[in-house]
Image: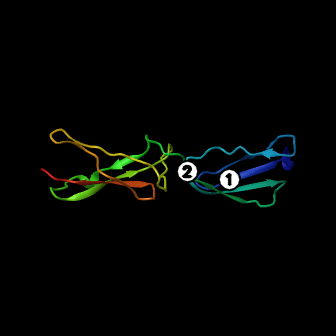
Amino acid sequence: TGSKAFQWAMRGAVNSRGLAIDNFDGIYGIQIPSSQHVGAYSLDVSRGGVHIVGSPFVINMSPGDLSIYSTSVDVTILQGLRVGQTSAAVIQTRDASGNKILEGGEIFRAVLIDHMLGSTMPAVRDMGDGTYTVGIKVLLS
């Protein structure tokens, strides 16, 4: 404890600090609070005011797994679409904290339902950046 304790400080979108936990086997643990913010963080680890070898460390926080509850579909571009025109709705994938997922690889299926004509399944295109487009062409008015 005191000036001989290992201290850590993390700086980035969220800042936090604390003391390392002695496991009494020559290893110290650092419990960093989870962050909902992706990006680069700097982790400083020191003892008695002197940085340990390699400190500060760079930690890159990436988005978590896809959450269907945070993922959204933007259909505003489809408003006012006229017969014969083609456009696309955009699906933006996000993790549970609302961070945009920046890579593709998911599988989505879209179904357009017309109560007079039945349903169709337009193609969903993976843009490779966490967004997916659903092509839509208006055939009848």
Relative to 43, 98 lies left or right: left
Mark 1 surroundings within 10 Å by alpha-carbon count, few (fewer than 14), some (14 through 19), many (20 or more)? many
Q: Which mark is residue 80?
A: none
Rendered view: 105 above or below 21: below
Q: Amino acid at mark 1?
A: Met
Residue drawn at 77 percent across, 61 percent down: 54
Q: Amino acid at mark 2?
A: His
Q: Which of 34/134 is in front?
A: 134
Kind of element beneath mark 1: strand
User: What mark, if any, has residue 37 been given in the picture?
Assistant: 2
Whether tag 2 and tag 1 are in contact, CB under 8 A, the answer is no
- In the rendered picture of this protein, how many numbered marks are placed on residues? 2
Q: Point out the image quarter for the N terminus.
A: top right
Q: Position of residue 92 (x, y in %)?
A: 41, 51
Labelled disc at residue 10: 1
Judged from this view, the residue extending furthest toward the left is: 141
